[in-house]
Amino acid sequence: MKASAPGFIRYALCVRSQAQLRHGCAAVLLFCLPVFALSNDPAGVGSARLGSSIPPHQPVHASNTVTASLRQLAAPQGFFIGAAVEAQTLRDDAGYRTVLAREFNMLVAGNAMKFGPLCPQPDQYDFTNADTIVAFAATNGMQVRGHTLVWHQQLPLWLEHGTQTPAQVKAILRKHIQTLVGRYRGRVAMWDVVNEAFDDNGPALRDSFWLKKLGPEYLAWAFQWAHEADPAAQLVYNDFGIEGMNAKSDAALALVTRLKAAGVPIHAVGMQMHITPEMPARLAENIARFRTAGFAVQFTEVDVQLPMPVQPTALAQQADIYRALLETAMTSGINTFVMWGFTDRHSWVPHFFKGKGAALPFDEQLQPKPAYTALHAVLTQAPSRR
Ligand code: 9MR
């Protein structure tokens, strides 16, 4: 289902309880893979920050061949291939950790850096899960995307249902952004500063908690506060349904262009890319117009959901979409391709879309699917095309 299709709205209505998202403490089991640093600056945010690293020899079996992993193919091309992760899963699932460290050179916290899960009581932050993810990334030579500073979902209940005045809400948001970005300064390369500010189907701004309390100025303030807390971080506007040419992406382009022209530190646009096996309309053309306006473009939450039970023809169709997405990214100047998870063992899709699933390139047994083989082939062939 494309993000703009009516059914996608369901996901906004089905927020899991925040209790489900709070995870307990446990020791972090980490890998110690040898690494080397890249000398280029692929994401344009400073080589010290994004000097990527890969394990030198971690072969993977895909299609009965022994070959390099995705990150081993991506890193020399200055490319970041990433996945969203949950800290509890990192702690509990050794197979998950192994595949993650072997295949990816970028991580994003699926939930651990959201305001509600991080700050269940006023001024009481629990960084356990976020720290777990950032430490795993550092140990395994991976970059971290921060997700997300300002969103209408997963807010702390004390705030969402509180009686704070607009001035107090402004001070709370500023403190939150500066606490979080400040803590990970130098360790989180890029932040989704504002997430999903537009209505599900656009083009109007979402009548969110933030818009109601603060008015549209909250958008510029959030970027400014994040920039103050870490001037080297790449700051991103992230949304769904802005992948193709449509009224919502028109509105997003107009917004980020207006902010940039006003001197707001906004550097990139994240296209989430939660889709069905159908390409967004005129994707390359849409990416090009954001880049022409001066923004880096990233694919930030890629998954391609299928009807369940999954059929071989659907897996082949899904592989074609993953192939086309990565090819489009690599031929459009994009260097960040992050999936919303990597294994069907842990994915939001079956929980939010009845009868849908199998959206990621590894199956529930952590075995590579045709989609993995497709990604691998694109990365293998890419140097000759770039
Ligand atoms: O994957 C996240 C899931 O575990 C949460 O329950 C959900 C809450 O709405 O958020 C999911 O992540 C979302 C992301 O933060 C923003 N874009 C859409 C993602 C999938 O819903």
Image: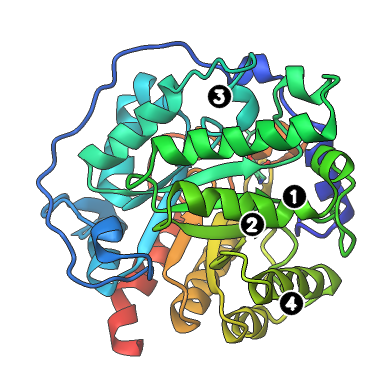
Q: Nearer the viewer, mark 4 or mark 1?
A: 1
Q: Residues within 10 Å of mark 4 (few under 14, many from 20)?
A: few
Residue assigned mark 4: 281
In contact (CB < 8 Å): disc 4 and disc 1: no
Q: Amino acid at mark 4?
A: Ala
Q: Is residue 29 above or below residue 1?
A: above
Residue at the (31%, 53%) spot, across then down: 105
Percent of width and height locating residue 289: 65, 84
Percent of width and height locating residue 146: 49, 45
Instruction: Mark 4 and ligand 1: say if the CB distance to the nearest ligand atom is below 8 Å.
Output: no
Residue assigned mark 1: 218
Instruction: Mark 2 and ligand 1: say if the CB distance to the nearest ligand atom is below 8 Å.
Output: yes
Q: Quadrant of the C terminus?
A: bottom left
In contact (CB < 8 Å): disc 3 and disc 4: no
Residue assigned mark 3: 118
Name the side, left or right, on which 281 lies relative to 109. Answer: right
Residue at the (23%, 47%) spot, across then down: 141
The mark nearer the N terminus, 3 or 2, is: 3
Task: Determine the CA span between mark 3 and mark 1.
Answer: 21 Å
Q: Residues within 10 Å of mark 1 (few under 14, many from 20)?
A: some
Task: Determine the CA span between mark 3 and mark 2.
Answer: 20 Å
Name the side, left or right, on which 337 lies relative to 71. Answer: right
- Which secondary structure, mark 4? loop
Task: Determine the CA span between mark 4 and mark 1.
Answer: 31 Å
